[in-house]
Image (tube, rainbow, N blue to C red):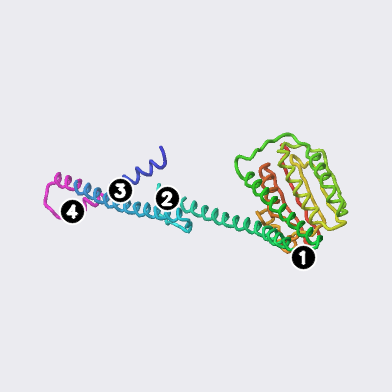
């Protein structure tokens, strides 16, 4: 027998016994001289009347309570529809029923509020990132209209306009890329890939950058085959290696290793660059977050690269961690399941 059904039977029998006991005592208190049979009938009728009265009172109470809850829910929904997510309804009814299940409404309102805050923050960040290069482009375009500029000054201003235009283009591309990755419709095609060959090809593609800064490249890549989306993983290595080159001073060292550890591929990318503060390390995978804004200002980054990296690795059920110390360097460690 179902436990819940058994409890209901016990409650019903207890309730009936109490009502009949109350009916019996009421008849006794009336002290009416009647035969035993009539007294028995009177007790039954009185008990039934008590049951009907208490049932009516309970029904009326619950109906009013439910009506009030429904009105509260409708009022809260109107507020949410108007953009006010600061709603909190009280559903402490004292027992679990269909009304207490509606308490998930509060959780929904909280989630909607968080999403709205994230949306506002995202819009604010995008606006800020777009406004900065646009201001530079407009300012230097106006300066170019002056007839007093030398040829060198004009070329310098044109170079800045080109740089800022490329920055806008990259920001737009990264925004579209991140939005696509976070949707459920982004193409995700896994295939067997020689990870060592892929990383080596990206290192060679970056050769002009690290040769220009006279960096020492310490490379150790084991032969590892892995089942991944090769195009997406290529973006991961490109971003991380470019960052290492960008933030490492002249004559520094970049170390890249790949090895198989049990059923995982372990990739580490280390540099002897400017490093990341301990506080910033907790936020570097967030959208638009830039560690050390004063220094980053000259690097023309958008703060989206590591967010894209983190998303791609998550899509492959992997993990990425960072260890860093200011002025000593940074190490990114990536773990990816081989199968």
Relative vertical location of residue 236 with respect to residue 89 in this rendering, above or below: above
Q: Residues within 10 Å of mark 1 (few under 14, many from 20)?
A: few
Residue in the image at 75% along x and 37% along y: 226
Q: CA distance from mark 3 to mark 2?
A: 24 Å
SS label for mark 3: helix
Q: Which is nearer the N-term, disc 1 or disc 3?
A: 3
Q: CA distance from mark 1 to mark 4?
A: 116 Å
Q: Position of residue 140 (x, y in %)?
A: 72, 61
Disc number lying in front (1 or 4): 1
Q: CA distance from mark 1 to mark 3?
A: 100 Å
| Residue labelled with disc 1 | 148
Disc number lying in front (2 or 1): 1
Q: Which is nearer the N-term, disc 4 or disc 3?
A: 3
Q: Position of residue 286 (x, y in %)?
A: 66, 54
Q: CA distance from mark 2 to mark 1?
A: 76 Å
| Residue labelled with disc 2 | 100
SS label for mark 1: loop
- Judging depth in this view, the residue of 155 and 120 nearest the camera is 155
Q: Residues within 10 Å of mark 3 (few under 14, many from 20)?
A: few
| Residue labelled with disc 3 | 15
Q: Which residues are magenta?
A: 17-44
- Judging depth in this view, the residue of 203 and 22 nearest the camera is 203
**Does the stretch in magenta take in 148?**
no
Residue in the image at 62% along x and 47% along y: 179
Query: Taking the image as drawn, is residue 93 in sight?
Result: no
Residue in the image at 76% along x and 42% along y: 265
């Amino acid at each position: 027998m179902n436990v819940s059904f058994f409890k209901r039977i016990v409650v019903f029998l207890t309730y009936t016994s109490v009502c009949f006991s109350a009916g019996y005592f009421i008849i006794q208190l009336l002290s009416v001289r009647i035969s035993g049979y009539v007294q028995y009938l009177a007790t039954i009728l009185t008990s039934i009347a008590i049951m009907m009265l208490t049932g009516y009172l309970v029904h009326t109470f619950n109906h009013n309570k439910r009506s009030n809850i429904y009105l509260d829910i409708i009022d809260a929904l109107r507020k949410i529809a108007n953009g006010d997510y600061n709603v909190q309804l009280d559903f402490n009814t004292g027992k679990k029923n269909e009304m207490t299940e509606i308490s998930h409404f509060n959780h929904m309102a909280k989630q909607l509020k968080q999403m709205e805050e994230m949306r506002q923050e995202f819009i604010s960040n995008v606006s800020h990132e777009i406004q900065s290069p646009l201001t530079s482009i407009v300012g230097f375009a106006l300066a170019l209209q002056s007839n007093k500029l030398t040829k060198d000054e004009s070329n310098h201003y044109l170079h800045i306009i080109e740089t800022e235009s490329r920055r806008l283009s990259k920001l737009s591309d990264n925004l579209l890329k991140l939005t696509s990755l976070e949707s459920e419709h982004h193409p995700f095609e896994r295939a067997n890939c020689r990870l060592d060959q892929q990383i080596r090809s990206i290192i060679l593609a970056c050769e002009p950058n690290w040769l220009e800064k006279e960096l020492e490249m310490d490379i150790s890549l084991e032969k590892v085959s892995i089942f991944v989306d090769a195009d997406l993983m290529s973006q991961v290595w490109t971003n991380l290696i470019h960052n290492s080159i960008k933030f490492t001073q002249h004559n520094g060292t970049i170390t890249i290793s790949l090895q198989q550890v049990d059923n995982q591929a372990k990739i580490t990318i280390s540099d002897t660059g400017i490093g990341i503060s301990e506080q910033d390390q907790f936020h570097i995978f967030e959208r638009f977050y830039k560690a050390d804004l004063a220094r980053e200002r000259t690097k023309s980054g958008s703060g989206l690269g590591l967010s894209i990296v983190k998303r791609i690795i998550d899509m492959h059920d992997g993990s990425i961690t960072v260890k860093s110390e200011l002025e000593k360097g940074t190490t990114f460690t990536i773990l990816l399941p081989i199968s």
